[in-house]
Image (cartoon, helix red, strand yellow):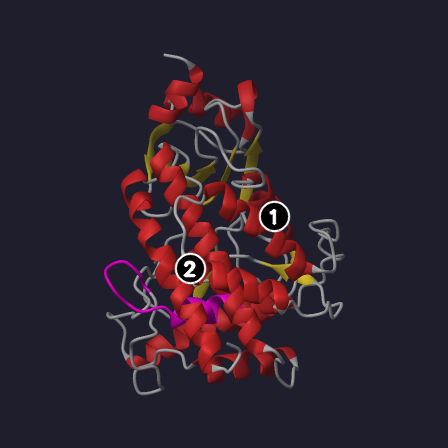
Amino acid sequence: MSREANAAAALDEAALGAYLEKHVEGFKGLTEAKKFSGGQSNPTYLLTADSGRYVMRAKPPGELLKSAHQVDREYRVMKALGPTDVPVPKMYHLAPDGDESPIGRMFYVMEYLEGRVLWDPRLPDLDPEQRFLTYDALNAAMAALHDVDVKAVGLEDFGRPGSYYERQFGRWSKNYRASETEHHPDMEALITWLEENMPADDGTVCLVHGDYRLDNAMFHPTEPKLLAVLDWELSTLGHPYADLGYQCAYWRLPYSERVRGIGNLERSRATGLPVEEEYVEAYCKRRGLTGIPNWEFYVAFSLFRYAAIIQGVYKRGLDGNASDPETAKKSGKNVPIVARVAIEGLQKAGHL
């Protein structure tokens, strides 16, 4: 079997174990590499060894969109954030692409943390107070991230400063067109509105996560304590409202079999599910801000970008490159749903 075919089918655990014993301090005796279920981007594995448990995150096999699946960026940003107030796992090793990698593609190994990933945004197993505290912990970690001094942690070259939204719009428009499989009228209307209503650059630059949401974080097994923010492949230097807008935009989506938002659920202190206005206010208070002008643009842009991301996932599913192909193929049905929520938000705010 060729290296490419082997990478697509399974890991060579013997080669991987031998490599890690040479490159990860203290690593010894790999006994199993088991892929975690869920997630559509970079396949992630639990490594069990005589020396303990570790997590490995790798590029997927096959043809990939340009600038996608940059696990080296994930590794670099989490390693840099280790000394800060942003909770991240410890980083152990980054392996290169190609023949120097025991699996034929880039990957990194990080600390294994004992905790929970909360996949259901309703948090049905928690009481209202625990739900509120869980979402508030997300808010606090995001505010801490946006307050990081990028120069002090060596990330001043982690992206191009300025014109963040203009550049992001260009990038995700191209990615959407590259993976487009059918015409969606609401998506076209959203793209047109964003292009015509792009805000002027205000000079604000910070480190942004790029996919900041509940299921990209790990929490303590029993407490509403955030142990680590995960999945940093879209992180860059950007504008702080990108993360905040994306998180709030995601919650505007309905909760259903196909989409896991909370937009059709009761959001109040009585239920513990976050009220958008209060969540934004808490973030502003933590960062010393008086408010966020042009808020609907940031939400609409975030919904557009999310739709472009899941369209790319759908296309990878059709092409057979997705981490979970069957789930990926279902994601295409969500693109018009996301675009419709964005259009309805703009209409409600009087922008359309």
Q: Earlier in the sequence, mark 2 or mark 1?
A: 1
The x, y position of residue 37, in whole percent, is: 30, 44
| Residue type at tag 1 | Lys
Looking at this view, is 34 or 231 the one in front?
231
Q: Which residue is mark 2?
A: 185
Give above or below for 314 relative to 133: above
Q: Is residue 160 within the magenta segment?
A: no
Residue 279: x and y in percent read: 48, 80
Quadrant assignment for the N terminus: top left
Q: Is residue 100 left or right of residue 269?
A: right
Query: Which segment did they paint magenta?
Result: 245-260
**Dot 2: few (<14), some (14–19), or many (≥20) neighbours within 10 Å?**
few
Query: Marks 2 and 1, how far apart in space?
Result: 42 Å
SS class, disc 1: helix
Q: Say which mark, if any, is on residue 341.
A: none
The residue singled out by tag 1 in the image is 79
Give how far across and how far down residue 231 sits, in percent: 48, 51
- Image position, residue 62 (x, y; %): 44, 28
Question: Which is closer to the viewer, label 2 or label 1?
Answer: 2
Which residue is at 65% across, 64% downward?
239
Figure check: 75 above or below 276: above
The quadrant in which residue 123 appears is bottom left
Dot 2: what SS?
Answer: helix
Question: Is residue 252 found inside the magenta-colored segment of the image?
Answer: yes
Vertical comparison of 172 with 162: above or below: above
Q: Quadrant of residue 186?
A: bottom left
In the displayed orientation, state which residue is furthest to the top. 1
Query: Residue at 33% across / 72% down in the picture?
Result: 262
